């Protein structure tokens, strides 16, 4: 059977796209599956897609690239029909031709007229309307999906969807409560109205152990998610447990407002806005608790993702998803909608009870299995079978279609296709290694390469980017049990492997041809970095694995004779307060350390600040606002100083002060601080601490 999903833009990162990719991949185990994307905006999808699922766009909106032999010639940008309104889609859904227009009308009509699919599944209102209006040939089953709630669409979109639904074979909601709402609003409709949840897979990453003093939230930064309530609740949490932290992952229009709220509440040292992160599972696993504070949730994919990673979820009991996913008191907590005090109380309940947090996390992992894509795919198969039976029974005998081939086998496969597949097996495919990287309890990096195409003698090389130095070679070992899914492994030992400061790429090499193949990244698991400390002695070293923007596994390394880790950066009434720990060096018994501010931008003057040395290599100092202003020397422009630590007044090598220890690669994007008295502390691209003084009036 051939199943075709219609997505608006399969190259984005939304929940509908993620769920469609998950279920399509599961269905591909037994069927021919394709995803048809109405538009294409980038070269490759942001989310991983099963290789058996074909992805093809109808409209190419990528910019033209004419230079070079590999230039992209064909593009639909500038097509005159893009500016003409759709004849089928209401303006509220079309958004002034941005989403739907006369060209999408034309391409979808042509696609539905030509498709050889047995089932077409539309995934958003505009596509549902198209499927009902343009897919009436009876050649295939028509299924529409609702990924929001019945009452949340604008009136004209809701009316158009309600008018389209009777022309479909089935219409699915992601919660039973919303399916009941649809049935109540559409009495007498013969279309099958049912609930099928989103498919959310377990990833195989190392789950949370519940020990990190970290709460994680993730999703679009939009009003319906009510992150403002979570920030307000954290003021209560931070007052009782200042050692706990909150991370919020995502991007969206609410970012500036949330940044202001955090600064006004003085929580910049307690809450981090992390930006978007994909895949998000590695970040869930770093936390001990997940928080969802939405006003409404049609389903709640983030809830299931977090539960898969072993996190109990504190969620508002909003319509409709959380209450169907979470069993209150067993695998999470449900709190009233819109109540920041209740959110704080729920978080504190789990923060203050280690055993409850642990047991709920274990129960959450079990509960999340209900939403495995294979189970959701099986539910789709049952629905499709029932729809086929109903259609065959209802149609006159002379118009009934012949039965579809048995699922999982293409009956009557041509001999040529069989031979072609056999020839493909004989040809040695190019090596395209993909791996996950996991930080061990000792701080080493365990690289786990997926076994596909790996055979013979192989080795892993670690190569410093933009450097001519020879790469490090690390043994790559095949699995001991020889299981079909067991990974090949390599270990990067931080005690013995001497990596210079910089960014490093990983490659797999076949000695037979000595060609390096860069390693793709499945997951970069940094949970083991939380609570980990640098190795004693000098030099100070730190490694953080991460995925590059183009999907490869990379490693950022720091290596310094000594380093001053700024664990607290706070804007006090008197000035910038810094507290930290010295690594790779020690304060002498009569030490008189100083912090030196060296100008890096503008004509400002350098200056010194006294540092208090404490036990265990700890230190603290305050840079007064008045001293910063004096060092501007009357200059009206922006002035920037870098900070270094000197163990005593003298000429010894300065020790850079910064934030390196932990799991965050680029802290200049996450560790942001408010402007106070015209002064803002900032972290550089190398995660070193600097001070910016803004002109008066900024």
Image (cartoon, helix red, strand yellow):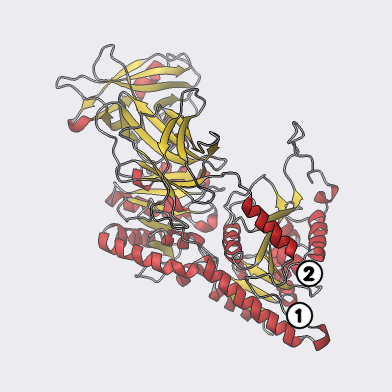
Residue 659 versus residue 425: which sits nearer the camera?
A: 425
Residue 113 quadrant:
bottom right
Tell me where residue 406 sits by quadrant.
Answer: bottom right
Residue bearing the label numbered 2? 135
91 in relation to 406, above or below = above
Which residue is at the front of the view, 522 or 262?
A: 522
Q: Residues within 10 Å of mark 2 (few under 14, many from 20)?
A: many
Where's residue 671, x and y in %? 42, 37
282 sits to left or right of 60 = left
Q: Mark 2 or 1, which is nearer the eye?
A: 1
Name the element at disc 2: loop
- Residue with the most extreme right position: 80
Identify the mark nearer the N-term, 2 or 1: 2
Q: Which residue position holds label 1?
A: 402
- Is 617 drawn above or below residue 124 in the view shown? above
- Is residue 320 found left or right of 236 in the rendered image? right
Is residue 604 among what the camera can see? yes
Label 1 neighbourhood size at 10 Å, few (<14), some (14-19), many (20+)? few
Q: Residue 305: x and y, percent? A: 46, 59
Q: Residue at x 39, y 45 (%)?
A: 526
């Amino acid at each position: 059977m051939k199943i075709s999903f219609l997505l608006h833009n399969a190259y984005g990162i939304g929940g509908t796209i993620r769920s469609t990719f998950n279920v399509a991949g599961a269905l591909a185990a037994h069927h021919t599956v394709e995803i048809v994307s109405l538009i294409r905006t980038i070269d490759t999808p942001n989310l991983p897609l099963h290789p058996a699922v074909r992805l093809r766009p109808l409209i190419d909106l990528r910019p033209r690239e004419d230079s070079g032999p590999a230039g992209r010639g064909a593009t639909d940008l500038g097509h005159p029909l893009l500016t003409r309104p759709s004849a089928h889609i209401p303006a509220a859904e079309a958004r002034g031709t941005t989403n739907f227009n006369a060209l999408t009308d034309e391409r979808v009509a042509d696609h539905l007229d030509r498709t050889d699919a047995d089932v077409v599944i539309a995934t958003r209102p505009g596509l549902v309307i198209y499927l009902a209006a343009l897919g009436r040939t009876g050649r295939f089953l028509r299924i529409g999906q609702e990924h929001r709630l019945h009452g949340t669409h604008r009136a004209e979109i809701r009316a158009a969807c309600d008018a389209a639904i009777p022309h479909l074979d089935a219409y699915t909601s992601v919660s039973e409560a919303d399916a009941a709402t649809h049935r109540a609003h559409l009495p007498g409709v013969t279309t099958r109205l049912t609930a099928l949840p989103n498919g959310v897979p377990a990833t195989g990453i190392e789950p949370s152990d519940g020990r990190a003093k970290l709460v994680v939230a993730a999703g679009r930064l939009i009003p319906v998610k009510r992150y403002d309530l979570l920030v307000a609740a954290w003021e209560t949490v931070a007052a009782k447990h200042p050692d706990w932290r909150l991370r919020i992952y995502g991007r969206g229009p609410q970012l500036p407002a949330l940044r202001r709220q955090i600064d006004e509440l003085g929580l910049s040292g307690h809450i981090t806005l992390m930006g978007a992160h994909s895949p998000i599972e590695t970040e869930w696993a770093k936390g001990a608790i997940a928080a969802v504070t939405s006003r409404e949730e049609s389903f709640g994919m983030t809830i299931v993702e977090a539960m898969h990673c072993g996190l109990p979820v504190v969620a508002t009991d909003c319509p409709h998803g959380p209450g169907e996913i979470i069993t209150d008191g067993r695998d999470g907590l449900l709190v009233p909608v819109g109540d920041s005090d209740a959110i704080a109380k729920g978080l504190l309940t789990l923060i203050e009870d280690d055993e409850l947090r642990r047991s709920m996390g274990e129960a959450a992992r079990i509960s999340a299995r209900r939403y495995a894509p294979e189970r959701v795919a099986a539910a789709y198969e049952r629905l499709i079978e029932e729809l086929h039976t109903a259609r065959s029974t209802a149609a006159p005998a002379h118009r009934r279609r012949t039965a579809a081939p048995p699922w999982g086998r293409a009956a009557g496969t041509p001999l040529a296709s069989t031979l072609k597949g056999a020839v493909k097996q004989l040809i040695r495919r190019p090596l395209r290694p993909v791996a996950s990287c996991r930080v061990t309890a000792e701080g080493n990096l365990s690289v786990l390469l997926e076994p596909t195409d790996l055979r013979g003698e192989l080795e892993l090389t670690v190569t410093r980017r933009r450097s001519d130095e020879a790469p490090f070679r690390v043994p790559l070992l095949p699995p001991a049990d020889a299981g079909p899914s067991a990974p090949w492994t390599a270990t990067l030992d931080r005690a013995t492997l001497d990596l210079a400061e910089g960014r490093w790429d990983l490659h797999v090499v076949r000695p037979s041809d000595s060609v390096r193949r860069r390693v793709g990244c499945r997951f970069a698991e940094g949970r083991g970095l939380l609570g980990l400390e640098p190795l004693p002695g000098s030099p100070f070293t730190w490694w953080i694995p991460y995925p590059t923007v183009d999907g490869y596994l990379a490693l950022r390394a720091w290596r310094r004779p000594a380093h001053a880790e700024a664990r607290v950066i706070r804007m006090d009434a008197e000035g910038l307060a810094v507290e930290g720990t010295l690594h790779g060096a020690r304060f002498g018994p009569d030490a008189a350390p100083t912090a030196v501010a060296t100008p890096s931008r503008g004509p400002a003057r350098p200056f010194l600040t006294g540092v208090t040395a404490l036990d265990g290599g700890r230190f603290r100092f305050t840079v007064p606002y008045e001293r910063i202003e004096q060092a501007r020397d009357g200059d009206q422009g922006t002035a920037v100083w870098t900070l270094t630590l000197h163990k005593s007044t003298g000429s010894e090598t300065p020790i850079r002060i910064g934030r390196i220890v932990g799991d965050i690669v680029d802290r200049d994007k996450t560790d942001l601080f408010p402007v106070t008295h015209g002064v803002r502390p900032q972290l550089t691209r190398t995660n070193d601490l600097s001070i910016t003084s803004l002109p008066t009036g900024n």
